[in-house]
Amino acid sequence: MSKLVAFAAIQGAYNIVSKAEGIYKRALEQYGPEQKLEFPNTAYYLPIIYSLLGIPIKNLGDAKKGMDVARKLLPPHVKNFNHLPYLGPLLDAGMAALFAEEIVEAIRYVDDPGFYHVSEECDVENGKIWLGAAADTIFRKRGVEFVDGSAPGFAAIVGAAPTPELAKEIAEEYQRRNLYVFMCANQAGTTFTEQLIEAGVQVGWNTRLVPFGPDISAAVFALGFANRAAMAFGGVRPGDYKKMLLYNKDRIFAFVNALGEVNAEWAANAAGCVNWGFPTISDTDIPEILPTGVCTYEHVVANVGHHDMVQKSVEVRGLKTTVTKVDVPVSYGPAFEGERIRKDDLFVEMGGGKTQATEMVEMADMDAIEDNKIIVIGPSLADLGDKGGRLPLGIYVQVAGRKMQPDFEPILERQIHHLVNYAQGVMHIGQRDIAWIRMGRPAVDKGFELKHIGQILHDMFHKDFGSILDKVQVTLYTNKEDVDKFTEKARAAYKARDARVENMTDESVEIYYSCTLCQSFAPSHVCVVSPERTGLCGAYNWMDCKASFEINPTGPNQPIEKGECLDPKLGMWKGVNDFVYKASRQKIERYNFYSIVYEPMTTCGCCECIAAMLPGCNGVMTVHRDYTGETPCGMKFTTLAGVMGGGASSPGFVGHSKYNVIQRKYLAGDGGLLRMVWMPKSLKEELRENLEKRGKELGIPDLIDKIADETVGTDEATVLAFLQKVGHPALTMDPIVG
């Protein structure tokens, strides 16, 4: 390895730490040691320092510990007579720089609270483009994509491309490969983010092009995101630095693109990234570190052309990506799913309360339909003229196949939402008969037409579900009369399906299904899905898993013969236990489906909700991941997920989906829904209709009004007083812990 590399990185680390010490000293004098220090709306304190050192920095006084470690890590400067290997000191220097920068960025939140726009989307019109640390609600939502594989990794881009057009080319190629792009630093005052905005590209979490900040110190938000994922989803404990860094190397596929002249401080940050196993690929002539060691392959690769940057980066990282090919005239991929079509760019709008938009998938006889036949009945986009306008829309997808079953219809139907959204310049919101579709003028200018919606569904249904279907025919209705008639037919089908699923019970089937998708992050976690116990993440029910197995017999959803029932009240079966013990690599011997008290199901960080016992109230509470406030158990959602979300079975706590709350077997072994004494108001409102229905079934019609929420209080004593006032049934039940 070049002595020049070590010299530059170590010198850069000294510069960063020295400047950080000056900023820290000034802040300490200005605000005092009790000044709160945090990344707003996040847990894990300052996540790099907390995850690697186990030091929770809560205020400026605590930050001295981090600054002291950074100073001690700085290695001796490289000298002409120094013949020691350089990689070890280089890594220490990089880590010192990152610890110092994390404290600097936390102080920035105190100095200038409005500098970072704490949101999922940028407010470009008002100049609020820097997003800083991802709030927990964003982190949970986006982090799941790294767990289930829909986001294979991220590119951390520092600096700027030579032109906005090249920046757009690089960014869109990463989007086509489904990668996130995390952006920071500037090159002579120019940033990659601002180049994308100039080129008309939407930036923000919704398009996977995330502008963290204009300075190199904002790199800590990307690395902090990776470490938060390891703690939240992988159960890596704070302070276990070896496991943390290895986890990132093996499971978070990230790399750095350095665009433009690399100065000493950039070199220090690049050295820091090597600790994580994240290599740097540069477009300039910098000294390379080609031998393997910490990274999977090379550590630093130089002189990579801009048109080759994306391909070379994924090769160096050892990352396998795919580009989805669909016969449409716009770019296509998951990275475009969150794109917003705003009023100024809008060409045509369908549904969303403005017109009726309905979609349905229906099984057909093999001879009744023709594969890749796409029919548009009614006005087309050309009939709207240059100004565009509004249309009603009915999307009728008929599918046929020897392995196709009516139970798979709603599963295929749910795919319409994201498959249409994957088209650049097309926005899809809602499902069934409340769909809302917008097409942007740039997409229409490129030749996108209504028929291309059908083409997308044909091509992607064959790609994703080819093992169960052989033919896909799509009819698009745009006449109001036809759409109204189609909507009436679709609503009757929805009602029949819902009744069929509603009547299924755990006793009515002999096969349950596993889901091991989250084992990529939580190796000991095994989710078992039954008709009355949906997957923790909320994305998989029993029907989904059944279809998934038919599509991919060797995939994460495997059939499990439940076998002998060992405990009908708590929900334990011998066949399930045998599978769980094997699939968890002998870490989990058994668990119960219907209990939070006795050997509950394992929980991963992807769960929609986490329930916790409140012994003083003789009941349980639950909190969903979108709620960021305090709870009566003394822990926020993120803290709960960090404590027991790495694949552990934790008596007193259990993860579950939102829908599971209103399923009849929810915590049935402990008293069921009548034990529910607290949940966030937003979750109550989301589930209101079904909670009222379940309350009537249980003989407590006003049960929902007896459940406390944050407007009542967030401590157990206040909640108990409320329960006594309203006469909550949990208070008269047997003790929850016998």
Image (cartoon, helix red, strand yellow):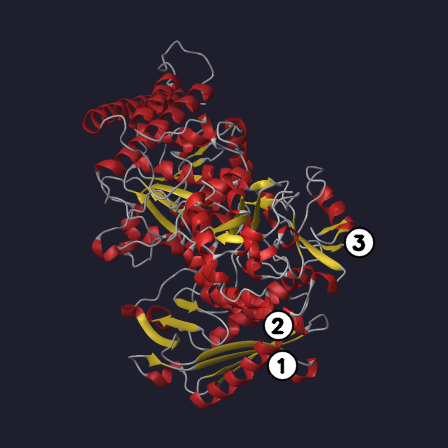
Residue type at the position of mark 1: Glu
**Where is residue 276 drawn, in percent x and y?**
48, 32
Compared with residue 695, is residue 581 higher up or lower down, i.e. above or below? above
**Residue extending furthest toward the bottom:** 481
**Where is residue 544 drawn, in percent x and y?**
63, 62
Q: SS class of the residue under badge 3?
A: loop
Which quadrant holds residue 220? Answer: top left
**Where is residue 104 drawn, in percent x and y?**
29, 31
Residue type at the position of mark 3: Gly
**Residue extending furthest toward the right:** 564
Few, some or many residues within 10 Å of mark 1 (<14, 14–19, 20+): some
What distance separates the C-alpha of mark 2 from that of mark 3?
29 Å
| Residue 409: mark | 2
Left of 36 or right of it: where is 137?
right
Few, some or many residues within 10 Å of mark 2 (<14, 14–19, 20+): some
Q: SS class of the residue under badge 1?
A: loop
What distance separates the C-alpha of mark 1 from that of mark 3?
43 Å
Compared with residue 220, is residue 151 higher up or lower down, i.e. above or below? below
The answer to whether one can see residue 117 in this image is: yes
**Where is residue 464 drawn, in percent x and y?**
60, 63
Is label 2 or label 1 in front?
Answer: 2
Residue at 80%, 52% in the rendered image:
564
**Residue extending furthest toward the top:** 81
What distance separates the C-alpha of mark 2 from that of mark 1?
18 Å
| Residue 370: mark | 1
Read off the residue under disc 3.
563
